[in-house]
Image (cartoon, rainbow, N blue to C red):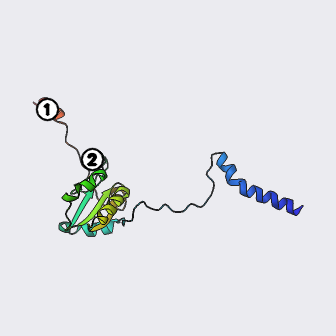
Amino acid sequence: MKKLSNLILLSLTLSSPLIHAADGATPAVAQAPKVPAFKAHVLNRAELDALLATPEKVLLIDVRRPDEVTAIGGFPVYLSIQNKDLEKSLAFIPKDRTIVLVSNHAGRAGKAADLLTAKGYNVAGAAGVEGYEAEGGTIAKIVPPLPKQANAQTGAAAQ
């Protein structure tokens, strides 16, 4: 009888995740921490501020789309090259500066940093503007200019 109860207990224990999965619940299985898809170091606010203290030695490359920079904000001075255009834009990137790649959460920036490191650039790491701001850093909110049509209408209304 004891063997039968142990067998039932073992059966219930093994099928428990399946029962929870069937009813839509996520089984309580230990998940390995997510490994970043890049090797570059993610800079925290203090590290990035230290680099920005010598602006003549550092170059920020923002790999986000312009609409993301406008919607979220960014750093006041940067070179804008989207990830898809980075490799064909290498001739425009100076090799005599320390480079920081920037994106929203450092994911795309990390991949871009790996590419530039492989091409021989001096890359300090990747930074995410949202993480930087969450750590107390100040980012610039960028207001795009009005389209020319809207400017003409506004100017006509002002007269």
Which image quadrant is residue 48 in?
bottom left
Q: Is residue 98 left or right of residue 20?
A: left
Quarter of the C terminus within the rendering: top left
Q: Is residue 123 above or below residue 8?
A: below
Q: Residue at x 13, y 32 (%)?
A: 152
Q: Is residue 29 above or below residue 47?
A: above
Quarter of the N terminus within the rendering: bottom right
Q: In the rendering, which numbered label is found on residue 90?
A: none
Residue 37, x across and y down, in percent: 42, 59
Q: Is residue 30 above or below residue 80?
A: below
Residue in front for this viewpoint, 23 or 35: 35
Q: Residues within 10 Å of mark 1 (few under 14, many from 20)?
A: few
Residue extending farthest to the right is 1
Q: In the rendering, which numbered label is found on residue 152?
A: 1
Residue 16, x across and y down, in percent: 70, 54
Residue 25, x across and y down, in percent: 63, 49
Which image quadrant is residue 153 in?
top left
Q: Residues within 10 Å of mark 2 (few under 14, many from 20)?
A: some
Residue 65, x across and y down, in percent: 29, 48
Q: Nearer the viewer, mark 2 or mark 1?
A: 2
Q: Find numbered disc 1 in the image and state the secondary structure of the residue it sits on.
A: helix
Q: Residue at x 81, y 59 (%)?
A: 7
Residue in front for this viewpoint, 102 or 133: 102
Mark 2 or 1, nearer chain start: 2
Q: Amino acid at mark 1?
A: Ala
Callouts 2 and 1 close, C-beta under 8 Å: no
Alpha carbons under labels 2 and 1: distance apart: 24 Å
Label tally:
2
Residue extending farthest to the left is 159
Q: Amino acid at mark 2?
A: Pro
Q: Find numbered disc 2 in the image and state the secondary structure of the residue it sits on.
A: helix
**Tag 2 residue:** 66
